[in-house]
Image (tube, rainbow, N blue to C red):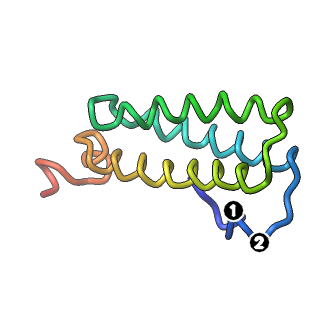
Amino acid sequence: MATAADGDLGTIPSDLASDQHRAERLLTELAMELRRVPVHEHTRYLHLRALALKRAVMRWPDEQPDGSIRLAVIGEVLAMQKEAQDWRRLSPSGRSAAGEGPAGE
């Protein structure tokens, strides 16, 4: 999940190592969120895209992508976190955890 420290993507000067560390931390948070999102035809792409982004971030030291590319990946991970949270809220188990569903409707 995004935190206040994440702030605006373009306001903090960045270098490859700090961007990679930030992306890895965000991907870890995304993975924890996705563990609670059921995999089905509508969410499968989130799981697969997260894995693809993880592989891409792991290659950053070798590929040396431009800062704008790194920030775009970080932005995509943040957007995916929000989408995963939304899917979790929509799932039956997410509604039950939030006090919704059959008993709380």
In the image, residue 21 lies at what x, y percent? 79, 43
Of pointers 2 and 1, the one earlier in the residue sequence: 1
Image quarter of residue 5: bottom right
Camera-side mark, 2 or 1: 2
31 relative to 25 in the view: left or right: left
In the image, residue 39 lies at what x, y percent? 34, 29
99 relative to 50 in the view: left or right: left
Number of marks present in the image shown: 2
11 relative to 45 in the view: left or right: right
In the image, residue 90 lies at what x, y percent? 26, 49
Q: CA distance from mark 2 to mark 1?
A: 10 Å
In the image, residue 69 lies at what x, y percent? 70, 50
Circles 2 and 1, Cβ within 8 Å, touching? The answer is: no
User: Callout 1 environment at 10 Å: few (<14), some (14 to 19), or many (20+)?
Assistant: some
Q: Secondary structure at mark 2?
A: loop
Image quarter of residue 13: bottom right
Depicted 43 relative to depicted 78: above or below: above
Q: Nearer the viewer, residue 66 or 51?
A: 66
Q: Nearer the viewer, residue 60 or 84?
A: 60
Q: Secondary structure at mark 1?
A: helix
Q: Residue visible at 88% across and 52% down?
A: 15
Q: Residue visible at 79% across and 35% down?
A: 60
**What amino acid type should be assigned to the residue bearing mark 1?**
Asp
**What amino acid type should be assigned to the residue bearing mark 2?**
Thr
Q: Residue visible at 61% across and 35% down?
A: 53
Q: Residue visible at 64% across and 48% down?
A: 73
User: Callout 2 environment at 10 Å: few (<14), some (14 to 19), or many (20+)?
Assistant: few
Q: Quadrant of the C terminus?
A: bottom left
Q: Which mark is residue 11?
A: 2
Please name the residue that numbered disc 1 is placed on.
6
Q: Which mark is residue 82?
A: none
